[in-house]
Amino acid sequence: MDALGKLRLLGPATCYEPAEEVRASGARAPADAAFDPGTYVHEAAMPNGKRIKLLKTLLSSACERDCAYCAFRSGRDFRRVAFGPDELAHLFIQLQQSGIAEGIFLSSAIASGGPHTQDRLIDTATILRQRYWFRGYIHLKIMPGAERDQVVAAMALADRVSINLEAPNALRLAALAPHKVFADELLQRLRWIEEIRRETPGHWPSSATQFVVGAAGESDVELLTTTEALFRQAGLARTYFSRFSPVPGTPLESHPATHPLRENRLYQSSYLLRDYGFSVEELAFDATGNLPLEVDPKLAWARENLAHAPVELNTADRRALLRVPGIGLTGVERVLAARQEGRLRDLSQLRKLGLVPQRVAPFVLLDGRAPAQQLSFWPT
Ligand code: SF4
């Protein structure tokens, strides 16, 4: 099978691996090509906000592990293929030179052990950097059981590295991936990444992880407690949440799919933990430890805490302003800048700052007065 044929099989397989802020797939194919890269080249927003065309692919779909939810688990009947490092690097450079792809997200199933697979991923990235002088974006997966030196080598080559924890703790992982060891094989690599960044000065990549949501009976409070610890202790840039969807021919084929809104609420909550100064204890969970699906987590907190103690927009500090629904990371800077020019007195000023008055008004004071009554004059 030629390299494009392999990409057709391995590229779509990364639908199980979220990466960066992938908003849409579908780079345009060249007019003369019987080749549609749309399912594996994605328009992705980089951590610096720049958008690039990101090729997402596996190096191999041949796996010796038996994770209960995974399409690539050993023994499952489907066609498996693998790139050689040279072959994939060459293909990517061709796509890059054709303007189809600008960066690469590279993961793999595991064959002959995590360290061996890690070597092949590192070899691919080394060929890209050293033979082809590729200077663009590389997101490289760290394999379970990879050695510390390999983690250093991967970090020296990549702009982002990630290792999938899949579950929030050892107990839940045992239900998902019986032959993975949560602390020693997975979590320890995330700790090493942070240690290496701290101990060795240099320009090191950001790090991320991924959880499968809804396959192991885990609750949102478990997922977010681990997320919070990873942000604070392992310096993670992102946690990705991948809602479970049953795959035929796996032990979990009859397990119900996870509601898409659950994934969304987890992302919203993780941003509150990372960027808005919230802690897990402040979020509202139901009796089963899950976030209510019907309400945005920040709004749920504000209804409990701000409805009777609104925030004065003219004097509140940045941290307090960020707790107001409708005021995000950009909005807060605008409010702070506007306060240098004069006092904020009515909702029209908020609208000029790009805020949605209807969202903000129930939870703030403007120059000592509740603006909520102004809403009756406000077009909805
Ligand atoms: S190790 Fe990765 S690719 Fe292999 S079965 Fe588990 S999740 Fe799937």
Image (spheres, helix red, strand yellow):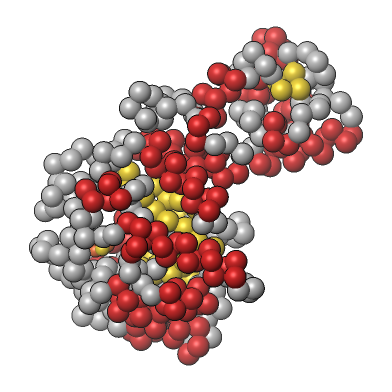
Question: Does residue 186 appear anywhere in the picture?
Answer: yes
Return the residue nearer the eye: 328 or 379.
328
Q: Residue furthest bottom?
A: 131
If the image is split into quadrants, where does the N terminus sit?
bottom left
Whole-percent x and y of residue 344? 82, 25
**Image location of residue 198, percent across then percent down:** 60, 66
| Residue 82 image position (x, y, % from top left) | 25, 76
Q: Left of 213 or right of it: where is 49?
A: right
Q: Quadrant of ligand 1?
A: bottom left
Question: What residue is drawn where x is 52% and y is 77%?
Answer: 156
Foreground pick, 231 / 21:
231
Residue at 64% x, 37% y: name it: 328
> In the visual, does 268 lie left or right of 217?
right
Using the rendered view, name the quadrant where residue 86 is placed.
Answer: bottom left
Instruction: Give the residue drawn at x 43%, y 74%.
Output: 148
Q: Is residue 156 left or right of residue 55?
A: right
The image position of residue 337, as x and y in percent, is: 82, 39
Is residue 370 rendered to the left or right of residue 156? right
Instruction: Give the camera-side residue of 209 and 242.
Output: 209
Asked if 129 appears above or below 265 in the picture, the reply is: below
Residue drawn where x is 22% and y is 77% of the image: 112
Report whether residue 57 is seen.
no
- Count of number-bearing discs: 0
Q: Quadrant of residue 200?
A: bottom right
Along the line of sight, which residue is nearer the eye, 173 or 335? 173
Measured along the vertical axis of the image, is residue 141 above or below residue 293?
below
For the C terminus, the image quarter is top right
